Image (tube, rainbow, N blue to C red):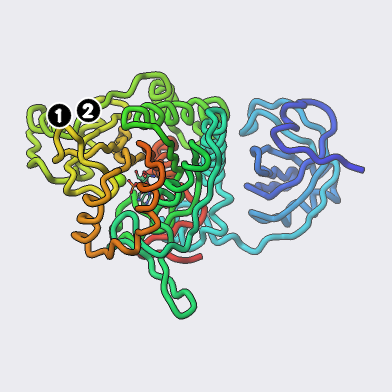
């Protein structure tokens, strides 16, 4: 029995007989040779067939088209002229399928690539991004489990909103209606009374009308919630988590970062430096004094202002104490100055902006009820949530990391759509 190994392992072996399988990445034939570059999930490798030496294999190999599926056996050796430094002299070739002309050729438009996402996934670029996404999710699980957090799941069908009614997706639910989850948070606030410290990585849905490079309608949020934790504890944890993720990607995905032509030195810096924390009010001052950007107190920061703040510090930066009035009902007014909420965002540099949002959770039931009413919500729908403030209420905090936002930033890619296998936006729901 032949033992098939990945292309990467074959190159590690470096000499002798190897058996590999995969897809034709490139093919070039002359009347003496056929060169096939084969790809699998691990890498690409050049394979060569000499007509004079193996005329039968040569006749088969000339028929190969891009993306044809094959397995082959041969002798591997170093060859500095080959694209990845190794070449296989083919001794046996088995063709599974000769592919039809592959629709994706060079210089296709972004929309064409999105229409053909089911095929474009195989590109080296998408493969590299998907591997980095895999590392990021794995790092998040490790980060929280190492710190004694339990994984906890919330329903995706939810009876009410948590992050504002405007972006809810309504779903018919037998004779009734429900909404797709905008956040895990409200259920997590129930979970902490059982498990103390919890986290989750899960799908999140928002009917975002914005056609920006930073918004999806279906994205994955990595959230945490902890009893007894205050704002400063949540901020510190978020900073530690982001640095942990960066270190993991730098450890495991150097080759992928190179394929994406990402500035690795810059990521190494982000993995090392301390991230500053500033208050919203000081962020306004900074924008005004250093960049003549005049934001009146009380207005939310727009993308260009967030981008400027992170650019100023050249690393992720945490902004706290946003105006209470523009924040979700569960973000508590600060006891020192109730106009400011005990909340934070983390802004990533290089124009990637908000990657994390979190807060302490309000313990003031009347205040929350008023704010829900002001948003047009019926506080009665939140009775179960307010129960949590009746039976052993404790200070607690949490935050959510936008997975695709973090992956986009780490990969240095232009659009968040490439940070998820099959993106969903206002204008795209296929394939
Ligand atoms: O700031 P957000 O709305 O916070 C919450 O939902 C809280 N309930 C989280 C919590 O405290 N447990 O969302 C958190 C993060 C944002 O910082 C952003 O990174 C990401 O989720 N995000 C999106 N990512 C892609 N597409 C969208 N439409 C997003 N909306 C938010
Ligand atoms: Mg936010």
Q: Which residue is mark 1?
A: 282
Q: Secondary structure at mark 2?
A: strand
Percent position of residue 193, x then y: 47, 42
* Front position in the image: 47 or 341: 341
Q: Secondary structure at mark 1?
A: helix
The answer to which image quadrant residue 340 occupies is top left
* Front position in the image: 400 or 419: 400
Q: Which disc is residue 191 wearing?
A: none
For the residues bearing labels 2 and 1, Cβ distance under 8 angstroms: yes
Percent position of residue 359, x then y: 31, 39
* Front position in the image: 246 or 378: 378
| Residue located 57% across and 57% down the image | 119
Q: Is residue 109 visible?
A: no
Q: Is residue 152 visible?
A: yes
In the image, is 124 to the left or to the right of 377?
A: right
Name the quadrant of the N terminus.
top right
| Residue located 34% across and 49% down the image | 214
In the image, is 6 to the left or to the right of 386?
A: right
Q: Which disc is residue 278 wearing?
A: 2
Percent position of residue 121, x then y: 55, 52
In the image, is 92 to the left or to the right of 179?
A: right
* Front position in the image: 142 or 108: 142
| Residue located 40% across and 32% down the image | 228
| Residue located 39% across and 69% down the image | 170
Q: Is residue 9 depicted above or below 390 in this figure? A: above
In the image, is 163 to the left or to the right of 157?
A: left
Q: Count neighbours of disc 1 (C-alpha within 10 A) and say few if under 14, some if 14 to 19, many if 20 or more.
A: few
């Amino acid at each position: 029995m032949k033992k098939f190994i990945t292309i990467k392992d074959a190159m590690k072996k470096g000499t002798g007989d190897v058996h590999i399988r995969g897809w034709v990445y490139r093919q070039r034939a002359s009347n003496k040779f056929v060169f096939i570059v084969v790809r699998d999930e691990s890498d690409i490798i050049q394979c060569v067939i000499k007509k004079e030496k193996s005329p039968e294999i040569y006749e088969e190999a000339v028929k190969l088209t891009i993306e044809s599926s094959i397995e082959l056996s041969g002798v591997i050796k170093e060859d500095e002229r080959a694209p990845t430094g190794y070449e296989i002299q083919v001794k046996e070739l088995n063709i599974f399928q000769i592919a039809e002309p592959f629709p994706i050729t060079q210089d296709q438009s972004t929309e064409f690539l999105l229409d053909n996402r089911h095929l474009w996934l195989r590109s080296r670029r998408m493969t590299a991004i998907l591997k980095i996404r895999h590392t990021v999710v794995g790092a998040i699980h490790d980060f929280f489990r190492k710190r004694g957090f339990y994984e906890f799941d919330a329903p995706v069908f939810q009876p009410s909103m948590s992050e504002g009614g405007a972006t809810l997706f309504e779903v018919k639910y037998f004779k009734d209606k429900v909404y797709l989850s905008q956040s895990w948070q409200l259920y997590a606030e129930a979970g902490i009374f059982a498990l103390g410290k919890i986290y989750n990585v899960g799908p999140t849905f928002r009917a975002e009308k914005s056609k920006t490079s930073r918004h999806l309608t279906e994205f994955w949020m990595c959230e945490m919630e902890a009893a007894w934790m205050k704002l400063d504890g949540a901020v510190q944890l978020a900073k530690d988590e982001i640095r942990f993720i960066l270190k993991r990607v730098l450890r495991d995905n150097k080759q992928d970062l190179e394929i994406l032509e990402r500035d690795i030195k810059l990521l190494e810096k982000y993995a090392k430096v301390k991230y500053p924390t500033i208050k919203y009010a000081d962020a306004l001052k900074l924008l005004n004094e250093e960049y003549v950007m005049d934001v009146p107190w009380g207005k939310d920061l727009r993308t260009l202002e967030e981008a400027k703040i992170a650019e100023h510090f050249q690393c992720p930066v945490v902004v706290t104490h946003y105006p209470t009035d523009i924040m979700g009902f569960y973000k508590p007014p600060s006891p020192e100055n109730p106009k400011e909420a005990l909340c934070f965002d983390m802004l990533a540099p290089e124009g990637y902006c908000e990657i994390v949002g979190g807060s302490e959770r309000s313990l003031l039931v009347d205040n929350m009820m008023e704010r829900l009413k002001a948003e047009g919500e019926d506080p009665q729908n939140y009775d179960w949530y307010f129960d949590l403030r009746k039976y052993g209420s404790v200070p607690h905090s949490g935050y959510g990391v936008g997975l695709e936002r973090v992956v986009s930033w780490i990969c240095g890619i232009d659009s968040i759509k490439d940070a998820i296998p099959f993106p969903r936006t206002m204008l795209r729901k296929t394939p």
